[in-house]
Image (cartoon, rainbow, N blue to C red):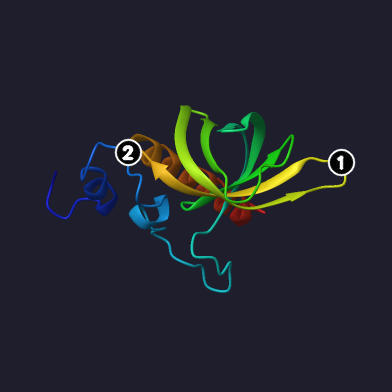
Amino acid sequence: MKPGGSSLVSKLLVSSAVLADRSFSELFPDPEGTPEGGEQRTNPRAVTLLPVRVTCDEGAVTATCVELSSGGILLRTQRPVPSGTTVQLEIALPKGPVFVGGTVRWSRVDSEGAGEVGVQLVAVSERAALSIAAYRAAVRATTKSDRVSA
């Protein structure tokens, strides 16, 4: 790697194992930070619609990712998944699926029994981290160009 190369690439070269003890956001903080006058979250979200398979001890459920950040994912599910549940997620990104582990931080049920679930990403392989970061960057770039042309 060239001197002065990408800090993201440097971080990716640290280990090829699953990084179970660190969240995605700890490993790959958002390089753009918090936009001035914009969202005040630690990890800004990319709004999207992606199919996700959620697997836990209680079985598997199909979900849709509606927001994705470097630290977590907001899912709409067919049925609720309780807070505190450890889950494995298969996220269907356009360039291929990625597999990550997470913990349900909050869960709510709508009037029809469908769930909305906030999952913190806690076990992310380097490949998955890079794929998610690239996808988020593409979505955010598209969103910014849409705002500029509007």
Q: Position of residue 70 (x, y in %)?
A: 46, 51
Residue situated furthest bottom in the rendering: 37
Three-letter code for the amino acid on which mark 1 is drawn: Glu
Q: Is residue 140 left or right of residue 129?
A: right
Residue that badge 2 annotates: 18
Please name the residue shown 71% across and 46% down the image: 116
Q: Tell me the crowding category of disc 2: few under 14, some 14 to 19, or many 20 or more residues within 10 angstroms, Cα based.
A: some
Could you say which is closer to the camera, residue 128 or residue 44? 128
Mark 2 vs 1: CB contact within 8 A? no
Please name the residue shown 32% across and 44% down the image: 19
- Taking 34 as reference, is 3 above or below it? above
Q: Position of residue 143 (x, y in %)?
A: 58, 50
Q: Quadrant of the C terminus?
A: bottom right
Q: Is residue 68 visible?
A: no
- Taking 97 as reference, is 145 above or below it? below
- The numbered dot on residue 93 is none
Q: Is residue 66 left or right of residue 139?
A: right
Please name the residue shown 55% across and 46% down the image: 142
- Quarter of the image where one finds residue 80: top right
Q: Secondary structure at mark 1?
A: loop
Three-letter code for the amino acid on which mark 2 is drawn: Val
- The numbered dot on residue 112 is 1
Could you say which is closer to the camera, residue 2 or residue 91? 91
Q: Which of disc 1 and disc 2 is earlier in sequence?
A: 2
